[in-house]
Image (tube, helix red, strand yellow):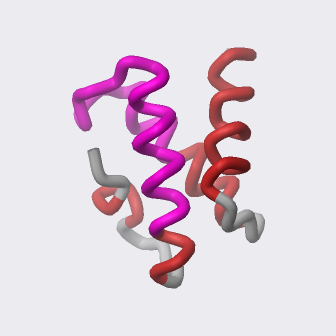
């Protein structure tokens, strides 16, 4: 499931987008999310974008950040 639809209105370089895409795909797989219209899928994408806006570019750290949030929620 690509993260691109969730990036509308944001500007990231291609490397950053790739890292977010990997983190998003892995998070969705870990959480069993398969529907882009699912509210939780949207929230997960938003959390990844939010973390990426802080300058994080590492896919593993983006993934770990969103998974820590999801486990705490």
Vertical comparison of 10 with 26: above or below: below
Front in this rendered view, residue 24 or 46: 24
The image position of residue 6, as x and y in percent, is 37, 55
Write the residue at 43% across / 56% down: 21
Vertical comparison of 61 with 41: above or below: below
Vertical comparison of 13 with 21: above or below: below
Q: Is residue 51 magenta?
A: no
Write the residue at 68% across / 16% down: 71
Q: Quadrant of the C terminus?
A: top right
Q: Which residues are magenta?
A: 18-45
Quick one: which residue is furthest to the bottom in this view? 13
Q: Quadrant of residue 25?
A: top left
Q: Quadrant of the N terminus?
A: top left
The image position of residue 67, as x and y in percent, is 65, 29
The image position of residue 44, as x and y in percent, is 50, 36
How many numbered callouts? 0
Q: Is residue 19 magenta?
A: yes
Write the residue at 63% across / 22% down: 70
């Amino acid at each position: 499931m690509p993260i691109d639809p969730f990036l509308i209105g944001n500007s990231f370089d291609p490397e950053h987008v790739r890292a977010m895409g990997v983190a998003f795909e892995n998070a969705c797989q870990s959480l069993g999310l398969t529907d882009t219209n699912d509210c939780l899928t949207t929230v997960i994408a938003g959390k990844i974008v939010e973390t990426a806006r802080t300058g994080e570019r590492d896919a593993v750290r983006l993934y770990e950040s969103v998974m820590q949030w999801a486990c705490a929620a």
